[in-house]
Image (cartoon, rainbow, N blue to C red):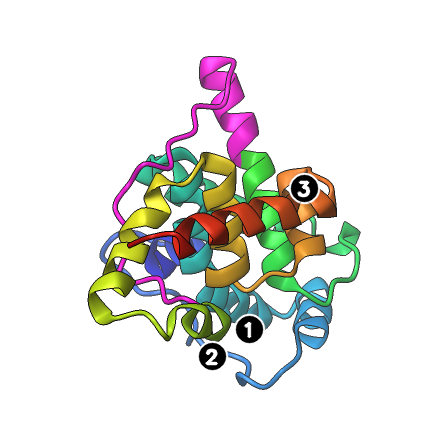
Amino acid sequence: MQELFLKKKYKTSEGSDPPREIVLHPQHITDSSLWKAFRAGDEKALITIFDRFAKPMYNYGYKIVGESELVKDSVQELFIEIWQNRSHLGDTDSIKFYLFKSLKRKLIRVKAKSENRLSVNLSIEYNNEISPSHEFVLITEQLSLERKERVMIMLNKLTKRQYEAMFLRYFEELNCDQIAEIMELSKQAVYNLIHHALDQLKKMH
C-alpha cells in the first residue's frame, strides 16, 4: 500500500522509483511531536505516519464495509487530503484516533454517495494479521487453546456494534472516550457494548 500511496503522491510511473529516499522518524517520537512535524510540512513525518497507521486503518475500514479496493483507495485519498490541508489541521496526541475517525467519516460519505446508505458487513473471518492487545490476552489467558481459538471465531458472531467496539478497544487499543467519538455513541453506551460482548464470550463452553 505504501508504494501505491507514494506513486499517487509523487505521481511516479509504474516502472520508476520515488524521486527521494524514504526515511522514517524513530519509533520513540511522540504522536504530538510527529503530528506537529507533519503539519509543518515534514514529508518524513508524512511517510512515518503512513507506515505506522495505513495497515491498521485498512483493517478497521475493511471491518466496516468489507470492500478491499474501496478501503485502500479511501486510505490513500485521506492521506493525500490531510497532507494538502495540513496547515488547517489542529493538534492531536493520538494520531491513530484522528485517522480512524476521519476514515470512518470518509467511508460513510463514499458509501452514502454510491448507495444512499451505509452497507455494513462485519461477518468476515478473523484476520490473523491483526494481533489482540495485551489486555485482551489477559482476559482470555485462563482459557484453553481450543477455547481461545473459539473466542476469536466467536468475535465475528457479536453484533456489528459490539464487534466494532471490541475491535477498537482490544485490537487497536483506543480508549472508551475515543471509541465513543468514533462510533458517535455515549461513553456509557460503549461500556455497555464491551461489557455485553465480554459477557457473551465468557459464557462460551
Residue 44 — which label? 1
Image side of residue 17 versus residue 102, left or right? left
Q: Nearer the viewer, mark 3 or mark 2?
A: 3
Q: Earlier in the sequence, mark 1 or mark 3?
A: 1
Callout 1 touching callout 2 (CB < 8 Å) = yes
Q: Amino acid at mark 2?
A: Val
Residue 158 — which label? none
From the image, which quarter does the C terminus lie in? bottom left
Q: Amino acid at mark 1?
A: Lys
Residue 189 — which label? 3
Residue 159 spot, x, y in % from top left: 44, 36
For disc 2, the marked residue is 23
Instruction: Out of 10 and 121, give the one closest to the viewer.
Output: 121
User: The residue tagged with tag 3: helix, strand or loop?
Assistant: helix
**Residue 119 falls in image quadrant:** top left
Residue 80 seen from this side:
no
Magenta span main SS? loop
